[in-house]
């Protein structure tokens, strides 16, 4: 069944952590909607000058209208978590037990939303202590799936496992 996946993203995202999963989601028939502060804005990746045109403004979207949340890594999640609108948006998906797919630095948004308490998760090495301090049960594995809802991975090398497990959760 086709899912609508809200993708929160801004400048300095990790290129391949956006492009590879999105390609995988679209090939499986899912719809990916990019969300940032400004609809129509072009955001740039930190590595390869990947550009993404934003589909929707955070002010114009309701998390109720989406089936899942995707948070690519890079510096983007750290920038977004400084804005309460994105924190509240992400918190909705965790509270409602909708699929949340977060890679690398993606869990930073979930830390700020205070939604990792007691949850199995992983992330980029530099944020693992922050995740532990937020109450997560941190594992150093290529992909961690918690309660068939939260999918997290550490880094670009983990993308194949991240995509595989994300698709399983989206199908479930």
Image (cartoon, helix red, strand yellow):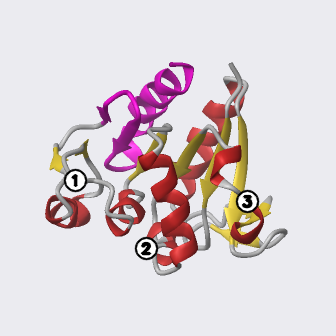
Up-down relation of residue 27 to residue 95 (above or below): above
**Image-based side of 60 in relation to 162, left or right:** right
Q: Assign a secondary structure to mark 1.
A: loop
- Quarter of the figure with the N terminus: top right
Query: Where residue 114 sits: x, y (%)?
Result: 32, 63
**Image-based side of 113 in relation to 119, left or right:** right
Residue 54 visible in the picture = no
Query: Where residue 23 sits: x, y (%)?
Result: 66, 36
Of discs 1 and 2, which sits in the foreground? 1
Q: Which residue is mark 2?
A: 78
Magenta range is 143-172
Whole-Å distance between the Cαs marked 1 and 3?
27 Å
Say whether disc 1 or disc 3 marks the residue closer to the N-terminus: 3
Query: Where residue 113 sits: x, y (%)?
Result: 39, 65
Whole-Å distance between the Cαs marked 3 and 2?
21 Å
Query: Where residue 138 sits: x, y (%)?
Result: 16, 48
The disc label shown at residue 117, or none: 1
Mark 1 touches mark 2? (CB < 8 Å): no
Residue 15 visible in the picture = yes
Task: State the residue at coordinates (63%, 41%).
Answer: 22
Say whether disc 1 or disc 2 marks the residue closer to the N-terminus: 2
Classify residue 148 by image quadrant.
top left
> In terms of depth relative to the viewer, which is nearer, 95 or 69?
95
**Image-based side of 56 in relation to 18, left or right:** right
Q: Which residue is mark 3?
A: 61
């Amino acid at each position: 069944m086709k899912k609508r996946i809200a993708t929160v993203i801004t400048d300095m995202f990790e290129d391949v952590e956006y492009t590879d999963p999105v390609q995988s989601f679209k090939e499986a028939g899912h719809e990916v909607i990019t969300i940032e502060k400004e609809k129509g804005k072009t955001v740039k990746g930190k590595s390869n000058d990947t550009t993404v045109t934003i589909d929707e403004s955070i002010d114009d979207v309701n998390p109720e209208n989406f089936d899942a949340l995707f948070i690519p890594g890079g510096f983007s999640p750290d920038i977004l978590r400084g804005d309460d609108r994105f924190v509240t948006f992400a918190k909705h998906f965790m509270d409602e037990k909708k699929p949340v797919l977060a890679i690398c630095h993606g869990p930073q948004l979930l830390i700020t939303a205070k939604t990792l308490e007691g949850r199995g998760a992983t992330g980029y090495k530099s944020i693992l202590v922050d995740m532990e301090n937020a109450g997560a049960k941190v594992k150093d594995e290529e992909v961690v799936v918690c309660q068939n809802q939260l999918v997290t991975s550490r880094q670009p090398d983990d993308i194949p496992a991240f995509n595989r497990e994300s698709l399983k959760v989206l199908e479930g």
